[in-house]
Amino acid sequence: MRPRLRRRPGGAPARRLQRRLTAPGGAPAEYDRLVELRRALLLFATVLILAALVSTIANPPQRGGEETVATTPAPAPSASSGSTATTPVPLTVTFPAGGRALSREIEQGQAAAVLVEVAAAAEVAIPSLGLTGTAEPLTPARFDVLVDQPGEHEIIVSPASGSPPSVPAGTLRVVAPS
């Protein structure tokens, strides 16, 4: 049977613990670094929570000031006995993808939404009106037009890939009202 050895204070296990807690040269030990990190995180969290509380308690800034703008209501439309004024209903004109170039007509002064469908991503232009837009297979190019002069306006489709070159999708003809 072996005799039991007593451990002295400051013996081997205590020395290992002391070495672990103290780095050579008196630098902070690993434990001290962890405590400092924990304190820094706790301080950061506290500041963040306080900032959130202050922002929820503080009044939002007033927008627009105290000024009030007096507006006069628009006069109600009244029907005269001799003539009836009607607002033209916007018209939708569609140029489908592929196929041959079509010609569509609208009346001079008629508000219209021109939709140009494409088979692949492309840029669509109506050069004579100075309008350009992009289109994809599920999203046609849309142009809101109100032309007050009669004439013909060619619609050109330029594929995003660059080939084939630009092709006419159709012509928008604006005619005098009948």
Image: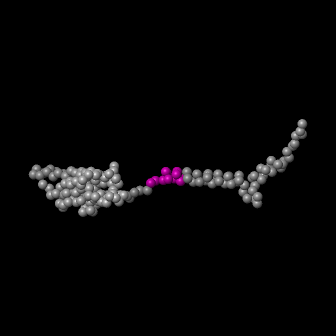
> Residue, x 30% and y 60% (percent of image)?
166
Bounds of the magenta segment:
50-60
Question: Image check: 86 left or right of 168?
Answer: left
Q: Is residue 91 visible?
A: yes
Camera-side residue of 171 and 10: 171
Question: Image check: 18 left or right of 4?
Answer: left
Question: Image check: 162 left or right of 26?
Answer: left
Q: Where residue 39 sits: x, y (%)?
A: 64, 53
Q: Is residue 57 magenta?
A: yes
Which residue is at the far front?
Answer: 164
Q: Is residue 101 magenta?
A: no
Camera-side residue of 44 and 6: 6
- How is the rendered protein coloured? one colour
Q: Where residue 97 sits: x, y (%)?
A: 28, 51
Q: Is residue 113 visible?
A: no
> Residue, x 89% and y 39% (percent of image)?
2
Which residue is at the far top?
Answer: 1
Tell me the quarter of the picture where residue 112 sits. bottom left
> Quarter holding the N terminus?
top right
Camera-side residue of 101 and 76: 101
> Quarter holding the C terminus?
bottom left
Camera-side residue of 86 and 52: 86
Q: Where residue 146 sits: x, y (%)?
A: 22, 57
